[in-house]
Image (spheres, helix red, strand yellow):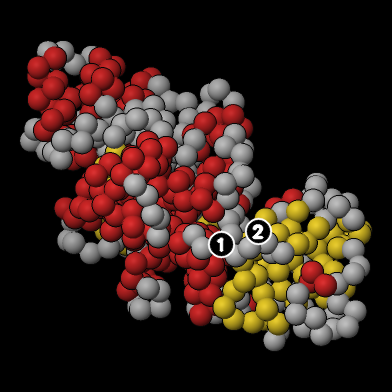
Amino acid sequence: MQISGRKGRHMLINDKYELMQGNHNSRPCWAARSGAPRYIFHSGKSRWCIGKQLDDGAKCWAYIADATQDTKTPMVCSGPWVCYDSDNQWRPDASLKCKEVAASDDKFVKMRIALFDDMKDFHFEDPKVFHSLWKRIDYNGNGIVSLSEVDKMVVEMCAAGQFPAYLNSKPALMRAYKKTILTDGDGDDWVERKEFRALLLNIFWFAKLFEVFKDMAGDDRRINAQEFQTSIGRLGLQMSPTEAAAEFSRIDKNGGGQVLFVEFCAYVRERLDPDHDADMDEDIVSGSNCGRNLRAKQGDKATRDLSVKRKTFKDFDELEKKIKRLMNDNKELMKLWHNCDYNGNNICSLAEIDKFAVELFPELNHKPALMRAYKRTIKEGNGDDWVQKKEFKALVSAIFYFNKIFWLFDEVNGDDRRITMAEFKQGLVILGVGMSDSDAQREFQSIDRNGGGIILFDEFCHWFTSKSCPEALTNYLQ
């Protein structure tokens, strides 16, 4: 069925809702195709409700009275829908309409609706289970959780068999996290309790999408035109080669000849909601243009990747001098260690490191760089999942090192998170590294090992930390 006509507060209920497999309160229930968690369900008493979770309707956004208390659909109810307005008052809304529409046969719509049933199977609608899971992730009880804390929860729950293994996917987790904070939440860098339900749904959703994407893309995690044409049938789409080529061009909006996961998510977003406005922040569901929307919100000085202060060489030069002084001052370094190891157990988790970096070095609050620094430190340490005191100095250096690399990467790659040959040469100019076109071409090809014509951040980092890294660049960043 379709809900339409709502304006003002809770406009998000305007959507198409697909019938779910199970019942709620012995009645059918429906889930929204896209966006944040939204359901149409019966309260079990005398109302049909629209709300963010399947419950008794006590905290719903809109309802319609069920006079006979035996209806199987809200469409047969005669009274007006009553909505919760911006002044916290309940009022009838004659503009809100509920009508029947044809069910979708789209593979991704069906996958989306099945996802809600998966969520029910994990009992996330049970308040006790939900509360317990929130307490687990918000272990310090400050009411907010970071990306690293979310990652820690997923890793541990998957390892314990409490979450399916496919959820432990970093690209999907990053996409889920960004959608939650930038679209479903209030736009800050943290997931709050009120946003946690949306986060769980997003984690499951993008993890499922990533499984489909990997099946199409192969080991290089990029779909080319040939791979798209050969696997299009598995998506339930019947297309001629010409139609498939046109569809691929529509997904590959920058014309690079390859589709990355973020572009694939944008494509699915359009299939779920063809009428969505690409200029609204709804497109952050896929991650497309999220940098543009953040800058529009924060102003011209904003940058991408959850940081709104534009950084310069001067910022990094000054911070580099500060960190070098710290590295040579054992007393100050020990103070930093105790700040990071705030529970005093002599080991630091990824969540503690994230908190440490955000609070003391806000310039270094880039999550991809922080994750890279953490993984490099534990790999070169004793191999466990914790940073110990003897590894802390290496960690601080790595956090600075990889953030500076990420800043350079972010400066030259535009909005698409990948560096072309022309952008690579531009980066060399920014660094003041003299290199001929032929040498630059060889360096670029050594990074772009699969010959796709683009460099991702992981490849860029690997280059800087490998023997093929030009000595001038290595010295510059040390």
Name above or below for residue 48 compared with residue 355. Answer: below
Residue at point 81% right, 85% down? 70
Name above or below for residue 182 compared with residue 117. Answer: above
Q: 464 or 22, which is in the foreground?
A: 22
Within-10-Å neighbours for mark 1: few <14, some 14–19, many 20+: some
Q: Which residue is mark 2?
A: 16
* Quarter that holds the C terminus: top left
Residue 425 appears left or right of 193 = left
Q: Which mark is residue 104?
A: 1
Residue 185 appears at what percent x and percent y? 61, 51
Q: 371 or 325, which is in the foreground?
A: 371
Number of labels in the image equals: 2
Residue 384 appears anywhere in the view: yes
Name above or below for residue 32 compared with residue 147. Answer: below
Q: Which mark is residue 81?
A: none
Residue at point 45% right, 61% down? 107
What's the distance in space between the residues labelled 1 and 2, CA to CA? 10 Å
* Quarter that holds the N terminus: bottom right
- Amino acid type at circle 2 is Lys
Quarter of the view holding residue 439? top left
- Amino acid type at circle 1 is Ser
